[in-house]
Structures are given as structure tokens and as C-alpha cells.
Image (tube, grey):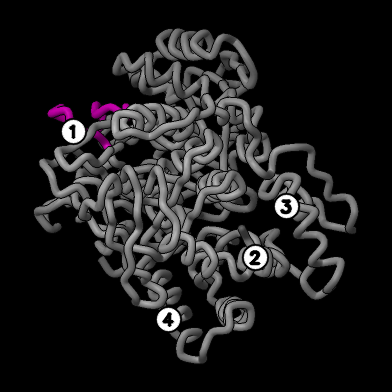
Amino acid sequence: MTGVGWREAARRRLESEEFDLLVVGGGATGAAIARDAATRGLQVALGERGDFASQTSSQSSKLIHGGLRYLQHGEFHLVIESLAERRRLLETAPHLCRPKEFLYPTYAGRFPSPTLLALGVGLYDALALWQPPVRSRRLDSREVHRLAPWLRSAGLLGAQQYVDCQTDDARLVLENLLDAVAAGAVAVSQVEIQPDHRRSGNFRVAQAVDREGGDRFEIRTHLLVNATGPFCDSFSGGPPKLRPTLGAHLVVDGDRLPTLGRAVVLHSPRDGRLVFVLPTGRRTIIGTTETDWPGPSGPARPPRPEDEIRAHRHDVDYLLETVNHAFPPADLQPSDVISTFAGLRPLIDRGLATHAATSREHAIWSDARGWLHVAGGKLTTMRSMAEEVVNRAIEILRDRGRQGAVRPCQTRVRPLPGAGKAVSASLDLAPDIGAHLCETYGVRVDQVLSLIASDASLGRRLDPELPYLAAELVFAIRSDLACEVEDVLRRRVPLALFSRTHGLDVAEETANLLARERGWSVERRAQSLLQYRAAVSASCMWQAS
């Protein structure tokens, strides 16, 4: 159920119904598990303490890719799985899995050599079974200068061109949740599930806190699934399983770092680590870093959602150093950084010396309490991870006496809600707006356009440089499960990331819409505004650190 009253209705169901599965965590893994389980016919509930995708799952490099660099560490199984999932997403969510050309330049005396890179890309294409979007070729230095004229020319030998895909990570999670809800699941944000529970007959009774109203309640389920990502160790309370690493990104204006629409793969001159330059509309994303959590001055314990997870000055300096070395004419300065974002990778700790060598494979395990845990993995493999978790969950449920047939996995071929051919020509839209709406909402774009048709004022741009429209604020609240100003402006209409004002100039308007749609008091509206301004302030704290 969506609509203004969706949360209240879902919250009542959480307390009154009985579930086969209770998923804790509304990021990529939790959303995909809820979708897989619900479409198989299981009774599913999901609780998320913040907004859906509010942590790592909206702080990624926003790529759907096989992981070319994983071949270096011999992780062929992960690459094969990732490329298969990339192909599935191209079919089931083409609006959210958009092919993008990548340039990987090679330099004399630097790793990798042209021959080694060509072999790696050839193997990458072979593992993808030579199916679309494979379009790789080797370029000489003259071709590279034509395609990326600002690239460093000294020692340039050429480049390898290949294709991977970009996505909107937060929206990919959201569409998984919307499909889960359409299949009967109950998903509620701002609900914190406690890590303890009690037994009542065949049920596990989990304790929950509604963070919006403050009241406590119980959820009855046969099986609890911990999908809290980098917070898995804090939630499980067992021996540490993870080696979380922090990945930070910068956003700069596209004119300050022109790549003519192609992504570029770089190596840091400091430590050789891989960094992407990713064009995204009028902006360019640079990332990512990879540093162990918590670092030398952080708390000596597993991370928690309330911890300060953000980019620091040394992250910004590292990324600017890398990109300025690769693109000398850019000469980017800290003042060119429009915004930063950062998240924790939930890597499984396998005792390796470096985080770069730590695998992106996932792990699934049960504990003595009968909980099922999942951690690790990557955004690209969220669906296949979920299929494996639900397979394991069904085995446990049957061992606990669950009767009745369960459908086989549906998500391999089931389209996400926006899949299909979107048409934006019904209104006189600027080209960038039409492209943005279709890429963001897919066939759901008609619902956004209908808002504009009924109120022309909703067709105005929210930022003169960006394609976001006022109608999207309304749509986020009514149809896309947004409950707070931060939900709207960071993960539904991401002005916080891409606007020079961080969306602060439309925060009041957004708060007014939420107050009107959700019946907020003056105090509640002020609270949501304050929360958003604090989040923007935190993302800018690198300037003082």
C-alpha cells in the first residue's frame, strides 16, 4: 500500500499480524529479501530504523558492474555472478541499469600494462558471455585525447574502452520495496527492531520501537533475518564477522571536470588504488576511498547507525590529488566540491592484510538463537544474495513446522515497478527533464506527469541547473514512501547531493508539503527541518576537519 496513510496502515499490520519472516534493515539486501520472499508467497515484514536505503545503500558509487578489478584477486565467481545480475537488471529494470562507456587509460611504467588490461577486459567480456552491453575495444593515445582531452598526456599509451552500467542506488532499493509491498509484504521505516526477542509457542516475538511516535510494540514472526549491513555485528551481538571500510565520494560540477559523458578509471598516484570519475547529468562524481573503520581516532567497537559516517578532509584531499594528477587542466580545489557522501562497506573479515584484497563475497549464517544473518556482497548482487537467503529461510521454516507450498524464486525475471517503455512527450518538457524523469521513474513517469497536468505550478524546476521538478516532491511523499524532509531531498529528489545549495532553499517548501500531507504539528515540521539541516551540515564538516 502507498499513499499518504501508507505508514500508519503498515504500522498497524506489523503489530496485528503474524509473519513467516521479519527482515531487519531496509537497505539493498533487506529490500531484496523482502521482495523475493513476498513474491514466493511468504508472509513478510520489514522494519528499518531510518529511511529506506538511508545508509550504505544510497552512498555507493552508483554502479551496476561485474567488478573488473576483482579479476586481479582471482574472484571469478563474484565477477560471473555480478555480470549475470547486471544482465538481469538490464532486462527487469532498464530505466535503473543504464549502460555507460568507461575509459581505462594506460601509462608507461604504470600498472596495468596495455596488454594486461586488454586481456583483463577480454576475460571480463567472456565471463559476461559476450552479451550486451559488451562493447569493448582498444584505443591508441590519439583516440584517447579525442575522447578525453584533459587526461594527462605524459606517458599515455592508450586506453581500453568497455561498458558497465550506472544506477540510482536509493531508487533501486525503493523499487524493490515497492514491489515487495505490491506482493503483500509490510515495510515500515522509522521502526527500530531490538536485538533481543522471546519465544511464544512457535513464534519469535521481537521488540520494536516506533521512532516516529515513540511507542513500543511487538512483532510475531517465525524467523528473524538480520540484514543490517555494516551494522550486522552491533545488531547480532555475537563475535565480529565484518571488516567495515569507509568509502567517500565527491560531487563537482561537470564543466570543471569534463569527460564528454564517459566514465574514466584512474589509479591514485599515492597508493595505486582504483578511483572512478563518473559523469552524472550536470555533475561528476569522484570516488571512492577505502579506509578501515573506525580509523585511529574512532570508537573501538563495531559501527552503529547513529555513528558519524561522513567524508573527512583527508578523503577529499586524496580524491582531489588523484583526479588532478589524471586531469592536470582541471586543477580542482576544495572550493570546487559541491557535496560529499560516504558509506560503510559491510565486508566479511577473512583476516587478509589489506582491505583492497578483502572479498566482496557475502556470507549467510545462523546463530544459537535461531536468527539468520547475511552480510557482505555488493549492490549489483543484491537480488542473487536475497534469493540465497530466502532459500535458506525456507529450509529453516520447514524445519520449524511451516506447512504449505512456496513458489520458486520469481525475481530472476520479474520486472521492477518502473520497467517498461516510458514516454515523456505528453508534456512540453525540456530534454534534460524528460530524460531524467524517464530514467528515474520508468513507466511510473505518467503518475508524475499527471500531477503537473492537474497543477501547472508543479512543472517548475527546483534548481536552475538541474532537471528536478516540484511535482517530484509531491510524488515522493504520496507514492515513494518518504516520511521526512531528508528522505525527500537526499534519496528521492537528491538536491542534497547535486545542488549547490544542498536543497536548503526548497527545504521549507518540502516541510510544508509533508506537514500538509501528513497532518504534522508546527513542532513536528520544525523537527524534520532541523534534522535535514543537520544532515547537510554533517556532509560539509570535512571543510573544518
Amino acid type, label 2:
Gly
Which mark is first along the chain, 2 or 4?
2
- Residue 429, labelled with which disc? none
Relative image position of residue 171 (x, y in whole percent) = 56, 49
How far apart marks 2 and 3 lie (CA) works out to 20 Å
Relative image position of residue 311 (x, y in whole percent) = 32, 56
How far apart marks 4 and 3 lie (CA) works out to 29 Å
How far apart marks 1 and 4 lie (CA) works out to 37 Å
Element on which disc 3 rests: helix
Residue shown at 82% from the left, 62% from the top: 450
Nearer to us of marks 2 and 3 is: 2
Instruction: Give the residue at mark 2.
Output: 3
Q: Is residue 125 left or right of residue 432?
A: left
Instruction: Give the residue at mark 4.
Output: 530
How many residues crowd mark 2 within 10 Å: few (<14), some (14–19), many (20+)? Answer: some
Which mark is first along the chain, 2 or 1?
2
Which mark is first along the chain, 3 or 2?
2
